[in-house]
């Protein structure tokens, strides 16, 4: 009897211990990543391994300091004893490379400065403890300055077709103070001669110094500077936005946040507030020296321009803006009412190709980088 | 022969009736399981032996099939108590001060010779004040925890119910079940205004077998345990962010959504085997053994129920054995108790996103307790002794490597005095001195705790009334700051 009871007990104990998931065999903190850094540009003629370049690995899975290591002479960088997580590798380096002429001949006596950045957004961990990958870098030689850093146009997750929480975020990527005085924010329908809306900052264009943007500062331009979370939990809090769009002829828009300065409509006959398409559009900021929009926007005044489109580039070939301003599209695959925005992969990162420059993020991050 | 009484005869120890009934609260310890099941209930207080039933096998094992024979009398017990803790010296996430309010009602009825019924209800209010960041009630008992970036106070309220049914199937076999159920709601007073809802269910089934010579009792317990905790923090201010902690060295800032949720889903079970042998080796010596295994898993996620973000999975498994030797050759006059506990606790936690171990913990506890209870005078009862515990700990975190590998000791000595002033009035005084090696997250190596309790009870025509005041003071090495507590309790029972 006792023997049977003991056997029963042992069986029960074993049954209990198997109620839980299996204990993993791998330990965290043992993950390794081996990266090869390459700068390859068929147009410029480069296919180089990057030596002695510092790479940082950032993860959003934990609040850890970025891991940092330097590539050896063969352009290989190895990280060991990492947390087991997805990483975003960050490469930003200024190098000098010899000019390669049209015949493909390198001219060592003619060196060109390049700013190279990586194009990899995420490195997902493999099942074993080692990941090997190649990091391709591209040039980011657009001049730093005031950039459209984020556009939130899809509206929050809702079933009411509601999207009035849109905003545009600017970022000063230069090392000097920029001024918003008199600048213009435009929604462009097709090419620069078809401006749909234009709103202007107060102040004197080009010379005004009343509305500064410090280096590294984000500025949020909200359709309405309101905490929309009170309306939709999937929306965004824009009550802290620095600016909001106002159209004096939009009599239905009675909300005016006294803490947010106003951008005013400058196009006669427009009677609605700033609204942008939920799938595709062009947003431009201009220095304000051309404020007559009936003949379109002077390309020489454009400070930055971004075209976004949810349709993939394979299905669409025509651009709504000159390629000299933006060669690609941001937000491919971004759905309406998804609560997602598009933001530059790094603050102010600009290659004039929004396909490379922007990623889709959720939730939107007004006033800060994802 | 009366079945119940015959079994009682086996187990009952008529140690004293001097302070009969006082500290009956010992039998109410399991009630506390209903909120936060600690998996392994501590055998506390080890120094209190005035309970006329002694530390019964039910108290050791919580086998409901041993309740009827452990507590042979009908009891109606009402208690209210208040405790205040001033934590001048504390860990980072401990409250600055804490107030506990409690009211409980317990009724034990032997409905017939076969049936014993216990029903109880308890209501607790706990206010944790001046808590830095933590949104957890017991921050240091958890591995996956949630914080925000504010300092505030949280009040926890909720009822707990308990029901026990012990049925004597035959003269020798008892079958019993016990249900503990508790719900608790907590609310932080400032943003993130975190609301906590806890539901805890514990079902115990037990069987006990009494030998023909009534000197041996065997028991078997099975436990099913299930609990859910829901946390919901609202982000209102820009600086009130929610943070998930993985241990004490790694955290993750949750996305600043309007509402941050954390879900804690726990489940587990336990199997215990118990044995009593009276007149073991020689007359007057009683041996009690309980041994068992218990395990619990904890799946933690944040986000909504529809779209949870897994944060981790934590398993705790405990193997435990308790041996109690009681020598009471003349139980009316004196008794010598020895208790040894061995406990092996193993923890591991895996990452929520990847199949890797992020934490491991192994603890081996050896605890020894010795106490001697005797009548110094006819009306003066003395209970004195001490206990020693050594907890060998091997704790490792892997995300950011951390290791704590040390043996922490606890040493305690106590002296309890009870005086029967007259046939209806008695007073007692408890004193305890304890030194405790502190865990790594304390900023001190050792604490010394002095505690005392003064109480009296009076017999009236309506039953017994008791009042007691207890106080403690804890000092820490390397600092002048002291933690203090004071409590008062009022009780009535018959």
Image: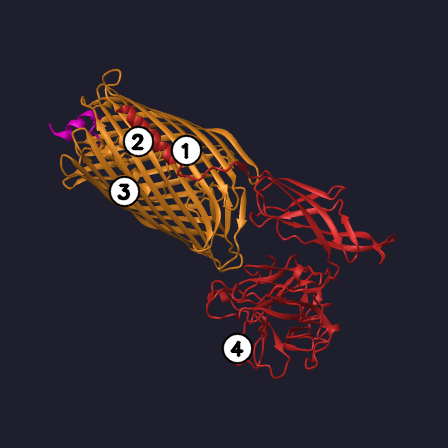
Residue B291: mark: none
Q: Which residue in the rendered view is the most extreme toward the bottom? A: A269
Region of the chain picked out in magenta, as a range: B1-19
**Disc 4 from disc 1: Cα separation:** 66 Å
For this view, does A91 lie left or right of residue B232? right
Chain A's colour is red
Chain for numbered disc 1: B
Within-10-Å neighbours for mark 1: few <14, some 14–19, many 20+? some
Q: What residue is pinned by disc 1?
A: B449
Q: What residue is pinned by disc 4?
A: A253
Tell me where residue B384 appears, x and y as whole percent: 32, 25
Tell me where residue B262 appears, x and y as whole percent: 45, 51
Choose the circle earlier in sequence order: 1 or 3: 3
Q: Do badges 1 and 2 share one subunit? A: yes
Contact (Cβ within 8 Å) of mark 1 with mark 2: no
**Disc 1 from disc 2: Cα separation:** 25 Å
């Amino acid at each position: 009897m006792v023997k049977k009871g003991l056997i029963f007990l042992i069986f029960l104990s074993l049954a209990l211990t198997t109620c839980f998931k299996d204990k993993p065999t791998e330990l965290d903190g043992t993950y390794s990543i081996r990266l090869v850094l390459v700068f390859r540009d068929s147009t410029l003629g480069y296919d180089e391994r990057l030596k002695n370049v510092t790479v940082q690995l950032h993860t959003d899975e934990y609040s850890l300091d970025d891991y940092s290591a330097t590539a050896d002479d063969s352009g290989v960088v190895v990280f060991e004893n990492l947390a087991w997580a997805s990483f975003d590798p960050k490469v930003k380096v200024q190098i000098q490379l010899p000019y390669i002429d049209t015949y493909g001949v390198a001219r060592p006596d003619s060196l060109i400065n390049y700013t190279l950045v990586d194009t990899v957004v995420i490195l997902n961990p493999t099942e074993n403890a080692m990941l090997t990958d190649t990091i391709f870098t591209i040039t980011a030689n657009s001049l730093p300055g005031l950039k459209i850093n984020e556009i939130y146009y899809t509206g929050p997750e809702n079933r009411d077709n509601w999207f009035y929480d849109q905003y545009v975020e600017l970022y000063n990527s230069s090392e000097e103070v920029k001024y918003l005085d008199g600048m213009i924010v435009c929604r462009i329908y097709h090419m620069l001669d078809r401006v749909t809306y234009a709103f202007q900052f107060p102040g004197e264009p080009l010379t005004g110094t009343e509305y500064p943007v410090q280096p590294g500062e984000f500025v949020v331009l909200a359709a309405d500077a309101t905490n929309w979370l009170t309306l939709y939990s999937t929306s965004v809090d824009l009550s802290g936005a620095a600016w909001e769009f106002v159209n004096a002829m939009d009599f239905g828009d009675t909300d005016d946040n006294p803490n947010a300065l106003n951008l005013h409509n400058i196009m006669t006959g427009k009677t609605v507030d700033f609204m942008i398409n939920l799938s595709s559009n062009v947003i431009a900021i201009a220095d304000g020296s051309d404020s007559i929009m009936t003949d379109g926007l002077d390309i020489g005044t454009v400070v930055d321009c971004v075209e976004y489109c949810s349709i993939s580039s394979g299905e669409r070939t025509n651009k709504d803006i000159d390629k000299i301003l933006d060669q690609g599209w941001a937000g491919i695959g971004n759905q309406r009412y998804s609560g997602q925005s598009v933001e530059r992969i790094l603050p102010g990162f600009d290659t004039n190709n929004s396909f490379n420059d922007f990623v889709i993020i959720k939730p939107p991050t007004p006033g800060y980088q994802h | 022969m009366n079945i119940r009484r015959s079994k009682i005869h086996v187990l009952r120890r008529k140690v004293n009736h001097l302070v009969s009934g006082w500290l009956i609260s010992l039998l109410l310890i399991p009630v506390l399981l209903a909120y936060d099941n600690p998996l392994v209930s501590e055998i506390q207080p080890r120094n209190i032996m005035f309970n006329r039933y002694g530390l019964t096998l039910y108290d050791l094992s919580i086998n409901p099939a041993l309740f009827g024979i452990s507590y042979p009398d009908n009891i109606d017990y009402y208690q209210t108590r208040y405790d205040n803790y001033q934590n001048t010296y504390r860990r980072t996430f401990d409250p600055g001060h804490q107030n506990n309010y409690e009211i409980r009602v317990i009724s034990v009825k032997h409905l017939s010779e076969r049936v014993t019924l216990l029903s109880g209800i308890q209501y607790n209010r706990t206010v944790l004040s001046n808590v830095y960041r933590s949104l957890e009630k017991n921050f240091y008992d958890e591995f996956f925890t949630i914080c925000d970036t504010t300092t505030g106070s949280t009040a926890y309220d909720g009822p707990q119910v308990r029901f026990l049914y012990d049925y004597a199937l035959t003269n020798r076999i008892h079958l019993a079940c016990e249900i503990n159920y508790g719900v608790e709601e907590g609310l932080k007073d400032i943003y993130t205004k975190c609301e906590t809802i806890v539901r805890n269910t514990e079902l115990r089934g037990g069987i006990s077998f009494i030998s023909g010579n009534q000197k041996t009792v065997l028991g078997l317990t099975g436990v099913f345990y299930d609990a859910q905790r829901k946390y919901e923090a609202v982000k209102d201010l820009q600086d009130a962010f929610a943070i998930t902690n993985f241990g004490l060295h790694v955290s993750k800032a949750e996305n600043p959504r309007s509402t941050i949720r954390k879900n804690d889903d726990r489940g587990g079970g336990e199997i215990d085997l118990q044995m009593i042998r009276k007149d073991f080796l020689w007359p007057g010596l009683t041996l009690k053994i309980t041994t068992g295994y218990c395990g619990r898993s904890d799946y933690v996620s944040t986000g909504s129920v529809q779209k949870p973000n897994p944060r981790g999975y934590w398993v705790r498994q405990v193997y435990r054995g308790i041996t109690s030797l009681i020598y009471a050759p003349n139980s009316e006059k004196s008794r010598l108790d020895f208790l040894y506990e061995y406990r092996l606790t193993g923890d591991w936690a895996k990452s929520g996103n990847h199949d890797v171990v992020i934490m491991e913990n192994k603890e081996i506890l050896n605890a020894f307790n010795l106490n001697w209870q005797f009548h110094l005078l006819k009306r003066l009862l003395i209970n004195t002794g001490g206990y020693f515990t050594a907890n060998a700990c091997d704790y490792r975190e892997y995300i950011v490597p951390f290791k704590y590998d040390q043996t922490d000791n606890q040493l305690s000595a106590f002296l309890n005095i009870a005086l029967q002033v007259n046939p209806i009035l008695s007073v007692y005084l408890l004193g305890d001195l304890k030194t405790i090696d502190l865990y790594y997250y304390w900023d001190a190596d050792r604490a010394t705790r002095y505690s005392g309790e003064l109480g009296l009870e009076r017999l009236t025509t309506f039953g017994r009334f008791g009042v007691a005041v207890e106080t403690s003071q804890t000092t820490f090495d390397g600092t002048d700051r002291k933690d203090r507590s004071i409590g008062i309790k009022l009780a009535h029972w018959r």
